Amino acid sequence: MTASGRDRETLIAQRRASRRGRPRGSTVPLLQHPRRFETAAWTMATLGLGLGPANAAAAVAGVFSTRPIRAEAVGELLIRLSTGIDHATLKGRADSIRRRAEAAVWARTDAEEAWLVGSCGALLNLVTSEGDAGRMAVPLMELRELGWGPTLLRIAARINAAARSSNLPPADGPIPRQALRLAEALTRKAKTMQ
């Protein structure tokens, strides 16, 4: 090999060694990953609530978005909550969440499994508490101990900002037929109870 060939190989080796970031093929451990809360929420939605992987990922993308939540009136008694996502498409964002969560669930350590099981159990208890403050206290405390404090505060702030409006604008855009039927049924029921 000539001197120029060795110099070229040395230069290539130096460039490879100086690359930023993780080496190709490596992964960030779940407990160090900034999106670990999305992984726990996806796992809870699929295993605890029985949602399909794609639907669970789409719901998680909406909940963990940083965009504001919009509240709109559908009929007299039904409210539609919606938000934007932080990426180009919901489908792409949801697929990213699903793939990362599935990989993390299969390649977990004992400590990661303990955190994931604790988070999923507390999230499921919180979601199924039906707004009862007494039933919400314990899961919220457990989630706080598992490191969810700042994440839950951010989500709560988005929900509170949407709920502050007492005059909700009417929903614009298409409304699914099931939602319209539900709004009509709720309105009829409310009028018969008066």
Image (spheres, rainbow, N blue to C red):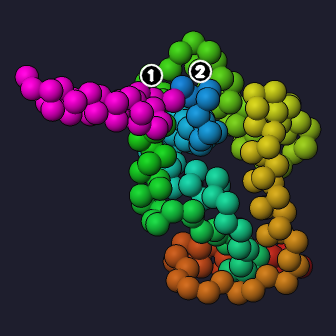
Q: Which residue is under mark 1? A: 107
Q: Is residue 147 visible?
A: yes
Rendered view: 147 above or below 94: above
Q: Position of residue 63 (x, y in %)?
A: 65, 55
Magenta part of the chain: 1-28
The residue sitting at 88% across, 79% down in the picture is 166
* 10 Å crowding of disc 1: few (<14), some (14-19), many (20+): few
The residue sitting at 75% across, 28% down in the picture is 146
Query: In the image, is residue 7 part of the stretch drawn in magenta?
Result: yes
Label number found at residue 171: none
The quarter of the rendered structure image containing the N terminus is top left
Q: Which residue is under mark 2? A: 112
In the picture as drawn, the residue positioned furthest to the front comes out as: 3
Question: SS of the residue at dot 2?
Answer: helix
Q: Amino acid at mark 1?
A: Ala
The picture quadrant where one finds residue 48 is top right
